[in-house]
Amino acid sequence: MKKVFINSIASISSQKTFDNSVFLNEIIDYNNTVIFAHDPDYKQYIPPAAARRMAKGIKMGVVASKIAMDEAGIETVDAIITGTGMGCMIDSEKFVSAIIDNNEQYLTPTSFIQSTHNTVAGQIALGMECKAYNFTYVHSAISFESALLDAKMQLENDEAEHILVGGVEELGEHTTKVHRTINHIKPEAVTISTVLNSKTEGAVFSEGANFFAVSNEKRESCYAELLAVETYNTLQKERVSETIEYFLEENNLKIDNIDLVVLGNNGDVEFDSYYTQLSEGMFRQTQQVFYKHLVGENNTVSAFGIWLASKIIKIQSIPEILKINSIATSEVKTVLCYNQYRGQNHSLVLLKKC
Amino acid sequence: MSKGVAITGMGIISAIGNNVPENYDALINGKKGITRVDNIDTIQRDEIMVGEVKFTNDELIAQLNLPPENNYSRTAMLAVIAAKEAFANAEITDIKKHRTGIISGTSVGGMDMTEKYYYEYLTEKPFQKYIESHHAGDSTQKIAEQLGIEESLVTTISTACSSAANAIMLGARLIKSGKLDRVLVGGADCLSKFTINGFKTLMILSDTFNTPFDENRKGLNLGEAAAFLVLESDEVVKVENKKVLAYVKGYGNANDAFHQTASSDNGDGATLAMEKALKVANLKPSEIDYINAHGTATGNNDLSEGRAILRIFGENVPEFSSTKAYTGHTLAAAGAIEAIYSVLALQHNVIFPNLNFKTPMKEFSMVPQTELKQKVLKTVLSNSLGFGGNCSTVIFSKEA
């Protein structure tokens, strides 16, 4: 089996993350319950006429994929695999509301065409004229991890050499309103420094795109080696620790071998205990970071966690704002990322210095 | 590379039957399930024909014994019915015994409820339970709950009309790589105003019975269905002494990279998908005994797919037919229902007719199989082509 390397990373998030030459040097605070992506200059990457037709998610996905391809120094790939939990919300909302508002009359196809979940992967393929394998995973909080697992399997078995893998999520106005009614969104505005201790239900909803060029060939730009990806549709809170132990064991590792844990706390009082039991339990002696206070919660935001882990492994420096505890290791060699959403769809991703 | 993955169970609900035997009976007797739409209140009713499962949602709820407070979309209910049949067919009793996962495909997801209660969600408490069943992964999670699959690899693919074919492909790869011992693969989509009106705006819906590969084809009939297959590793088959129905022998996926919704004139994507599948199966085109074509009966698809078939098979195109005239185009489920039809073809050595065909297309001389035909079949190739240029081929075989 071949090894799998993350050769490049790209992130469009609520922070200034699309420029790979910096690493959270400047933080954008908010005072809200929903936060939008901090946009790069899309015109630099997409012709304005094409960009006008694209909803936000497509633009973010296309641009993040270009940044990742450029950094890896590759022109094309053997597979494009994306993950998106909610899909193209903006066009879906446009088309549903037009159906209802006009009683199924006077409809135009554009928003329908762009509403399918695989629009972003399809548009990336169109832009690159890439006729290769093209998949889109749409399973809530493990959409990105499913894509990553698929890519990893193909690279290990040498069915592909270079794969573009990414997660993308866009905010839809109506969907946001609707999720407020069922308390999935925080009741009151919070800031970076208050969200994780807000003691209220729900999360800060967000959007973004995180893309990676992964390969079974280590490039000069290499960030990390991808050791393992595992997803679990269900996992009871009291089963998380032993599941992680078993997962580490399967990868011939012990808790002591983990230099850094990336946790998905989002400040939801109902579900953050999934993480705190780990930070106060099995990983209390391990350096820990979190990130959702900076970039909010969405179905593929865990890809931002992988982005973060990759970056830390490569530059061997952790911005203070990410740190949960004060434990420091001399070198960050092995990193574990754990995420879940509302108690379901758990994922474990293991990265190693390359 | 060339060894197949065993199929040990199948389940289906479609416009032509509520289980596998009923579907087979309809297929060999030429009974199509295309009618006016009854379960959706749409102004398009008199302008379109559909392949509809005739149970109302209330009837499905009763069949599944769901509590009144359930939040199942129609997609989820259809999915669970087919998934349960597949598991029963595979005689699976102890879920925990082997590492079992689910890979499902859907494009509509819970859109049927969202379009019904879109604005009501904001104020009407009783409907708010469906908010969480909107996302595409929901129906897959419901299958897992109903079958008792926990702490497992359960995921969903949405690549429009090739979703279920891709689910079968991933499932087979997961078994081959040893990641899972057993996996339920397939797809589900219900009819919705969203898709009815979407395809209407694209002007590719026929106002009468769809006629795949016919010169005068007027477009597709939308359909709804769910279908699932159980794939198991050689190890499980051996240990449990399982009866193998057929094998997933090869698979390939490629992107047409031509247009967001239309296929390229010369069928580049479909050609590549078939080439890859043949390579994985280690078969020559001449070793394919029957093609279950995607054949949606749109002007664009049948021309593009037909040309791709000619590019692969040249002068020696085997018998081919599209079963869409029976079921309509069931979108994300199509690849799974046609996988089951392919396995049935292998099991019974029979080729199902391409109904409603009269006039060959002027662009080529290919004529589909229009009568039921007995033929010893060793291999069947099934195509699924979708929006976003997504093209998939799965090859099924009698022997590993």
Image (cartoon, rainbow, N blue to C red):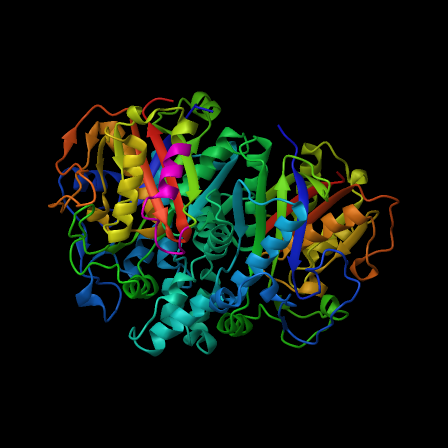
Q: In the rendered view, does A3 fall on the left or right side of A23? A: left
- The answer to whether one can see residue A344 in this image is no
Q: Residue B227: where, in percent of width, then height?
A: 34, 44
What is the quadrant of residue B381 in the picture? top left
Q: Residue B216: where, in percent of width, then height?
A: 15, 52
Above or below — where is A29 with respect to B93?
below
Camera-side residue of B253 and B150: B253
Q: Residue B205: where, in percent of width, then height?
A: 24, 59
Camera-side residue of B323 and A232: B323
Above or below — where is B232 with respect to B20?
above
What is the quadrant of residue B260 in the picture? bottom left
Residue beneath the point at 66% across and 45% down: A72
Residue beneath the point at 24% across and 52% down: B299
Q: Residue A201: where, in percent of width, then height?
A: 64, 68
Q: Is residue B262 magenta?
A: yes
- The answer to whether one can see residue B53 in this image is yes
Residue beneath the point at 27% across and 60% down: B56
Q: How many marks?
A: 0
What is the quadrant of residue B248 in the picture? top left
Position of the C terminus of chain B, as image quadrant, is: top left
Q: Which residues are magenta?
A: B258-276
Camera-side residue of B152 and B350: B350
